[in-house]
Amino acid sequence: MTLIPYIKEEMQVTVQSLKSNLNRDGGPIISYHQAGFLLESLEDLDKQLNAHGSRLYVAEGCPLELLKFLKKDSGLKHLFFEQDCEPIWWKRDGLVKNLCCDLNIPWSEDVGHTLWDPDQIIEAMGGSPPLTYNMLLQTIECMGEPPKPAPNPDWSNVKFWHIPSPIGTSSFRIFENVPSCSDLQLPYDQCFLPTRRIIGGEKRALRLLKTRIKHEMDAFSSGYFQPNQSRPNLLGPAMSLSAALALGVISVRKFYWSLREAFEKVYKGNLPFWHHVTGQLLWREYFYVMSRRNPEFDKIDTNPICLKIKWYNNEEWFQKWKDGMTGYPFIDAAMRQLNQEGWMHHSARNAAALFFSRGDLWLNWMEGARYFAEKLIDSDWSVNVGNWLWVSSSAFERVLNCSSCISPVTFGRRLEPSGDYIRRYVPELLNFSFEYIHEPWKAPLEIQEKARCIVGKDYPERMVIHEEVARDNQQLMLDFRRQTLVKLKRAPPHCHPSDEKEIYHFFWMPEECYHTHA
């Protein structure tokens, strides 16, 4: 019997989707960095199969025609794949399922990309997704713990199937080996030489998981949780597993249960396990649940949970933000890291997204989210869009109360006071001392000359004055709120934080990093 695992988004069999998604306007996007990570992960899988006398077959072209070929050539008996719960994949998976039915090929779809089945969470809520994160927590508490990860497979009795390669038809071709980005001639922005600190492959991801769990256990022993968020090291080795989770290189359930077991090992039952320990994984789950039955999740006008805020359209501002030329060093460092490496820390993403949207530039969050998707190595449609909806106050926000706003200066200084993060990615400011590197416009001219960087000449002036535009944007939001309340005679039904503390936990910043406009 010939059984075929259909490796889709997580380990895509067809590289044609890589090329098309890199060039697509709107819809699913995969970044150059993510394509490289994916291909490295496929190569790692190929090596693991080689050890058992098999190999991974990678094809380019139409997956439907490939399945027809496999049915005819090999007598394909069963197709296995993991559920992609995001609605952007409904059409693709529907075509494959329909073809399987037409060809009398049984198929099996398992839930494994999320902790729980999103549909079961929604049904437990009476058919509607939870409007707050706390509602999600209450629901999953009633549902019980997520399933544990499946054990490692036993390959000893598996008879592997082989096909001759390379094979080429008018509809597809099968490569002789796992291709690289250069083999596929995948395009990238010529302005930024791509470099990466996060490399693909299950073996690397498992080693990183082991290091990460030790890091978490050290934090547990010191009395705090989520050290990668609460005490981020922007300059150290990348500790994030988000790319591996986004592409299914490791199981989110394995990560969750590894954290639980580490917690129990440290506290030995003397402290009850609570949701903050796995908070980032639960936020990921929340955004998956919220998008599960909402194909318009990444839109404004047609998205039922998104507030219809009128954003500005300013291509010049948008370009400066993308290029890391805003005049705010921490924001510029974050954007340049994104362009060069395809990654930046969660806190830096929040700062850049807030600056782009309601904090400073008041630009359409959809454009910012799309740019992140084009660049991020861990780009994940539900999580990326969910974060942008949250940060821009378009959803998951508490009744349009935007009086608190993060300062791009204070935020950056609190995260990395030495300024070395800025020096790494904004080399124009290399010679500024920590006193001025977060605010170079405050440096006297002689200090700028000594640093060989004149603000306005060698490094841009601030494109906006944060204190002024933040106050103006607060007024815009208040005006929108009044108009909405008058029109609806009540606050619009929308998703919002459960309480004030949740806002600070989401941004992982103490209150001194916020300023309030009276």
Image: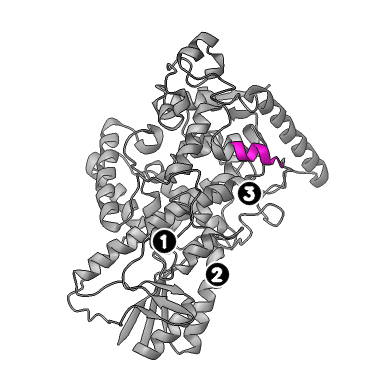
Camera-nearest residue between 341 and 269: 341
Label of residue 1 in the image:
none
| Quarter occupied by residue 235 | top left
Near mark 1 (Cα within 10 A), the count class, few <14, some 14-19 or many ≥20, is: many
| Nearest-to-viewer mark from 3 and 2 | 3
Against 178, is 268 above or below?
A: above
Q: Type of residue at label 3? A: Met
Residue under pointer 2: 90
Calculate the distance from the C-alpha at mark 3 to the C-alpha at mark 1: 25 Å
Residue under pointer 1: 113
Q: Position of residue 410 (x, y in %)?
A: 51, 23
Residue under pointer 3: 366
Near mark 3 (Cα within 10 A), the count class, few <14, some 14-19 or many ≥20, is: some
Q: Position of residue 58 (x, y in %)?
A: 37, 71
Mark 3 and mark 1 lie on one chain; the one further toward the N terminus is 1
Q: Position of residue 313 (x, y in %)?
A: 71, 42
Query: At 38% across and 55% down in the image, what residue appears?
Result: 37
Near mark 2 (Cα within 10 A), the count class, few <14, some 14-19 or many ≥20, is: few
Calculate the distance from the C-alpha at mark 3 to the C-alpha at mark 2: 21 Å
The range drawn in magenta is 313-320
Query: At 46% across and 23% down in the image, what residue appears?
Result: 429
